[in-house]
Image (cartoon, rainbow, N blue to C red):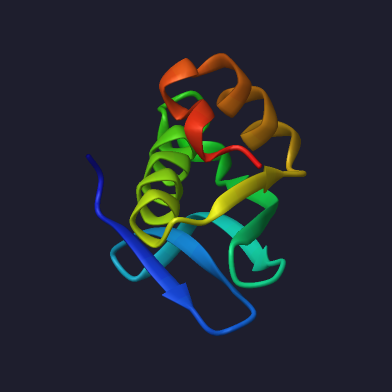
Amino acid sequence: MTDIKHISDNKGGTFIYEKEGTKLAEMVYVMAGASKMIIEHTDVDESLKGKGIGKELLAALVNFSREKQIKVIPLCPFANATLNKTKEWHDVLA
């Protein structure tokens, strides 16, 4: 798995992929109470399109949500489609 960073505060956070100090991809979420998160958007640099970085960001978010027992509401079209296609991640859906 690619090195994904997680930055968060009480209101939300971002899963980020950086290369040589440059942010190339991110998945942004906001908290909806203590036990739910809303994935707002995913952005992947054109140079990485089709290389699975978006799915790696989502995998990191899924692992985080499982650890913290947080359910996920995927408003982001990419996250919604990927979560719905990946049955092993359905347990995190709100």
Q: Residue 86, relative to residue 9: is it above or below?
A: above
Task: Name the side, left or right, on which 74 lies relative to 61.
Answer: right
Q: Quadrant of the C terminus?
A: top right
Q: Position of residue 46 (x, y in %)?
A: 57, 39
Task: Name the side, left or right, on which 24 lies relative to 27.
Answer: left
Q: Nearer the viewer, residue 14 or 46?
A: 14
Q: Quadrant of the N terminus?
A: top left
The residue positioned 67% from the left and 24% from the top of the image is 81
Q: Position of residue 63 (x, y in %)?
A: 35, 47
| Outermost residue toward the bottom in this view | 10
Q: Nearer the viewer, residue 80 or 42?
A: 80
Q: Position of residue 15 (x, y in %)?
A: 46, 60
The answer to which image quadrant residue 34 occupies is bottom right
Q: Residue 60, relative to residue 16: is it above or below?
A: above
The residue positioned 73% from the left and 42% from the top of the image is 76
Q: Position of residue 93 (x, y in %)?
A: 60, 37
The residue positioned 37% from the left and 48% from the top of the image is 60
Q: Residue 81, relative to residue 73: is it above or below?
A: above
The residue positioned 38% from the left and 39% from the top of the image is 56
Q: Residue 12, relative to residue 28: is it above or below?
A: below
